[in-house]
Image (cartoon, grey):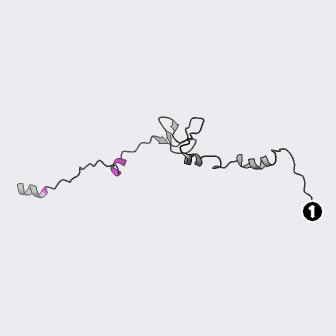
Amino acid sequence: HSLGRSLLWTPTPHFPVSAMTKGTTSQGPRNDKSHTLCRRCGVRSFHIQKKSCSSCGFPLAQMRRYNWSAKSKRRRTDGTGRMKYLKNMPRRFKNGFREGTQAKKQVKAT
């Protein structure tokens, strides 16, 4: 009997079978989301339980903004979107914010 047992025996590895690693094996249990998409900024930063966005601060009226992050201020400052209202300001300022007037017809030079 001892001979047959030695043929089936395999040496144990030098590391535990269920290795405590920080890589692939520990990523498996992560299947629940604490953050979802924010209604205001569109980033996946809205904490579901806290009901607040870690990126823009929604539902607070003021946008979340800190001087220690110049890059994030640069991403969302004036001039990064359409500027539907603001892009006409320099031209309107130049003309003194006139409204309701008609341009005079220009006479062709002969």
Is residue 77 shown in magenta? no
Residue situated furthest front in the rendering: 68
Picture layout, residue 48 above or below residue 95: above
- Residue numbers of the magenta segment: 8-32
Instruction: Name the spot of residue 99 as percent of width and height, x first.
Output: 83, 44
Q: Between residue 29 and residue 105, name the one nearer to us.
A: 105
Q: Amino acid at mark 1?
A: Ala
Q: How many numbered tags mark residues here? A: 1
Left or right side of 50 for 96:
right
Q: Residue at x 62, y 46 (%)?
A: 77
Tell which residue pokes out farthest to the bottom in this image: 110
Q: Looking at the rendering, which quadrant does residue 2 occupy?
A: bottom left
Q: Residues within 10 Å of mark 1 (few under 14, many from 20)?
A: few
At x 51%, y 35%, the residue is 51
Residue linked to disc 1: 109
Residue 42: name its quadrant. top right
Name the residue rendered at 51%, 40% in the picture: 54
Quadrant in which the N terminus appears:
bottom left
Magenta span: helix, strand or loop, mainly? Answer: loop
Q: Looking at the image, which residue sits at the far right?
A: 110
Q: Which part of the image, by quadrant, shows the C terminus?
A: bottom right
The answer to whether residue 19 is magenta is: yes
User: x, y percentage for residue 98?
Assistant: 83, 45
Task: Residue at 47%, 41% (x, y): give it.
Answer: 35
Q: Give how far across and how far down residue 93 sits, in percent.
A: 78, 46
Query: On the image, which quarter does residue 97 sit in?
Result: top right
Q: Position of residue 106 (x, y in %)?
A: 90, 57
Q: Secondary structure at mark 1?
A: loop
